[in-house]
Every structure is written in C-alpha cells, then in structure tokens.
Amino acid sequence: MVLQCNSTLAELSVHEDPLWPAHSTITFHGFGIGLSAIFGLISVLVSFYLIFRHATHYLVPNQQRYIIRVLLMIPVYAMVSFLSIIYYKHAVYFQVMRDCYEAFAISSFFTLMCEYVAPGLHEQKKYFRTLEPVNWFW
C-alpha cells in the first residue's frame, strides 16, 4: 500500500490565458491585482487623511475616538481585499481578520451613536431607560 500526500493545493492552481493575447500577457488575475492596488491605495490615502484630520483637531474626544475607529475599517478592508486577491488560496485567513475588525467597528459605531444621543454614560442609561417603544405604522 502506497501512501500519497494530499495534493489539493497543487490541483487548485489554475493556468490563465492572457486577456488580450495579441497585445499583452496580462491575465485577469493580474488585472484584478492592479485594480485592487489602485483603488485600495486611493481609499487608504483618503481614510488616513480623514483620520489625520480628526486626530489633529481632537476637539470632541468622546466622539472622535469612535469616528477614527470606524474610519480604520476602510484600510483594513482594502488590505484584506488586496491580500485575498494576491494569495487567493489563503483568503479565508484574511477574512477572519476582516470579520474581527468589522465587529469592533460596529460596536464603535453603536457607541458613537449613543454618544450623539446623550453625552456620557449616566445620561445614556437614563435616556434608554425612559425610552418607550412605538409600534410601526404597518
């Protein structure tokens, strides 16, 4: 009986033909990497500019710290998407990082909304305790 190693990853490799065979050797995967790099870089630069502006004009720290945390979601998504395209066989591991930060960003967004409703923990508790549900019109 001959034992053989699992060759699943080798079998998953795909050979691609060029998109425009007469003009270049760019494959669809290479084209996707280029687009992801360009738009990812633009989104990272814009979000870091906004983060920088919030950090240098830190006038309302109870709100701005949550805004910065939500803005950090853009570079995380851009990097995970870029790395998932390059290393598509290992994309599952990058998506775990994205999902973990997504939960953190959602909780930061909820806390930011609570800060907008009432500034301070005691005022928020008082507001939510006195809140009465209203039936929807349908």
Image (cartoon, helix red, strand yellow):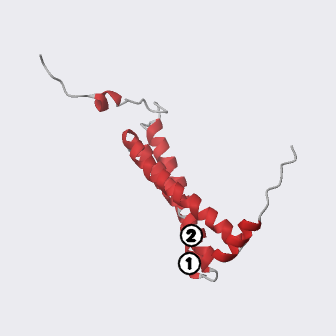
**Residue bearing the label numbered 2:** 68
- Please tell me which residue is depicted at 49% across the width and 51% down the height of the picture: 99
Looking at the image, residue 9 lies above or below residue 104: above
- Please tell me which residue is depicted at 18% across the width and 24% down the height of the picture: 4
- Compared across the picture, whether 58 is left or right of 123 comes to left
- Please tell me which residue is depicted at 20% across the width and 28% down the height of the picture: 5
- Disc 2 residue type? Ile
- Compared across the picture, whether 66 is left or right of 118 comes to left
Along the polypeptide, which appears first: circle 1 or circle 2? Answer: 1
Closest to the observer, 23 or 33: 33
Q: Position of residue 106 (x, y in %)?
A: 58, 58
Looking at the image, residue 15 lies above or below residue 58: above
Question: Helix, strand, or loop for circle 1?
Answer: helix
The reply to whether dot 1 and dot 2 touch (C-beta < 8 Å) is yes
Q: CA distance from mark 1 to mark 2?
A: 8 Å
Closest to the observer, 43 or 110: 110
Q: Position of residue 64 (x, y in %)?
A: 61, 74
Neighbours of disc 2 within 10 Å: few (<14), some (14-19), many (20+): many
